[in-house]
Amino acid sequence: MPVETADDRKLMLADFGETVTYIPDNGDNVSVIGIFDNQYQAVDSGGSVEFAMVSPRLTVRTEDVPNIEEGDAFSIRGNLYDVTIIMDDGTGITEIALEAE
């Protein structure tokens, strides 16, 4: 059972998040608050030199995107990202792996 409440999750995202636009494949666009992370990761491709690639992710309240599916999209900071992986943690938070269009 999660320690925090839905209001606690909403406050956390309001403090650390930003407004993004959720663009479902079937339905109307919705503004939600999420924490966007677009960090670089070192990737070993088997050669002598690693290369870096971005790994964009968005953390949102599960209740804000109840019907999210792979192939939906988000508009974040003027860029469009496709939803590639949805990771609902079972405590009211969903982490979404994105791919830039």
Image (spheres, helix red, strand yellow):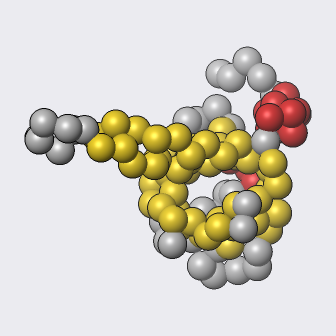
Residue 91, position in %: x, y? 64, 32
Q: Please indicate, yes or no, whether residue 86 appears anywhere in the rendered image.
A: no
Residue 55, position in %: x, y? 46, 47
Residue 20, position in %: x, y? 76, 59
In the picture, residue 45 is in which quadrant?
top left
Give the position of the N terminus as an image quadrant. top right
Q: Is residue 50 above or below residue 76?
A: above
Q: Is residue 53 above or below residue 29?
A: above
Q: In the figure, is residue 10 to the left or right of 78? A: right
Residue found at the far top of this picture: 3
**Is 82 or 7 nearer to us in this picture?**
82
Residue found at the far front of this picture: 49
Q: Is residue 21 above or below residue 53?
A: below
Q: Please indicate, yes or no, whether residue 89 appears anywhere in the rendered image.
A: yes
**Is 57 or 91 nearer to us in this picture?**
57
Residue 24, position in %: x, y? 64, 73
Which residue is painted at 66% across and 39% down in the image?
A: 93
In the picture, residue 89 is in which quadrant?
top right
Which residue is painted at 62% across and 70% down in the image?
A: 80
Which residue is painted at 80% across and 35% down in the image?
A: 16
Which residue is painted at 79% across and 68% down in the image?
A: 30
**Is 62 or 50 nearer to us in this picture?**
50
